[in-house]
Amino acid sequence: MAFIGTDNKEDYVVVNGTVVASGLTQTQWPLTTDDEGEALAVVAQIGRKRVLWTNSRTVPIQRHAWPGVGADGRTVGFVDMDDVIVGGDRVKVDGDPMAIAIGPDGKLAAYAVYAKVDDHETEIVWGGRRIVEKFEVHTMRVSPDGKSLAYIATREQDGRKYTVVVVDGRDGPPTAWAGSLRFAPDGRVVYRASKDDSAFLVVGDRAYALEGQLPFHFRVVFSPDMKRAGYGTMIGREMWWKTVALE
């Protein structure tokens, strides 16, 4: 179990009863963890410096951003101004980055940069290929086997914009909003979406209705046999743990 504690003077990260990071202030919540609850990263302040704590060390950063977990379930990374941070190390990319995806080997597998092509905002570099998108993309993820790439993109039709999740070049169904993108252990794409004032959990090509007031940092977990999914939500003034049966 991991959590962020405070004694009114500084913040600290505790994992299984042991303080693994201290001297932090203005810590950004929530803490990035893996599926077992182990602490992976947190963005905080040390003195006047903003830092990323990961891999038991602190790395100075410029952007107040939230790190994401790679396909290996352990390595974290995010875009920090003109370059990216992967596992606590800075990695230079060709262009101004907006989104990244970390592969199962814990290394940078794909990234999106601002394009210099007329009428297109984004270029995605993946497996030696360049994919052009008209609008910005975000929340890129690589599958656990490293063979599939998913990302959230914007589309436009008749002057109206909508959101899709793109998996290996194929658009998913149109939604008003999509987020919390990841791959399930069995390789199916997973994300949260909203449309017509309703919220859904999408697993592969199936959508399941979600209940209550969902947290911004939405998290879903799966049973070992992948037959059920669970998530936390607020119903009234109470926090509930809800499950859905997967087909």
Image (spheres, grey):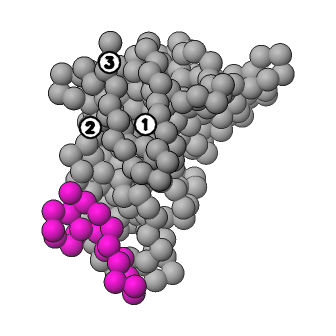
- At label 3, the amino acid type is Leu
- As drawn, 13 above or below 73: below
Along the polypeptide, which appears first: circle 1 or circle 3? Answer: 1
Q: For mark 1, what is the residue?
A: 101
Q: Quadrant of residue 218?
A: top left
Q: Is 111 situated left or right of 156 in this image?
A: left
In front of the other: 208 or 94: 208
**Residue 188 percent across, percent down from the top left:** 35, 19
Q: Is 176 situated left or right of 45 in this image?
A: right
Along the polypeptide, which appears first: circle 1 or circle 2? Answer: 2
Q: Can the viewer see residue 26?
A: yes
Q: Measuring 53% from the left and 20% from the top, which residue is drawn there?
A: 166
**Residue 165 percent across, percent down from the top left:** 54, 23
**Residue 244 percent across, percent down from the top left:** 34, 25
Q: Which residues are magenta?
A: 1-20
Residue 72 got which mark? 2
Q: Quadrant of residue 20?
A: bottom left
Residue 246 got which mark? 3
> Label 3 to label 2, Cα distance in Å?
24 Å
- At label 2, the amino acid type is Asp
> What is the magenta segment's predominant secondary structure?
strand
> Label 1 to label 2, Cα distance in Å?
11 Å
- At label 1, the amino acid type is Ala
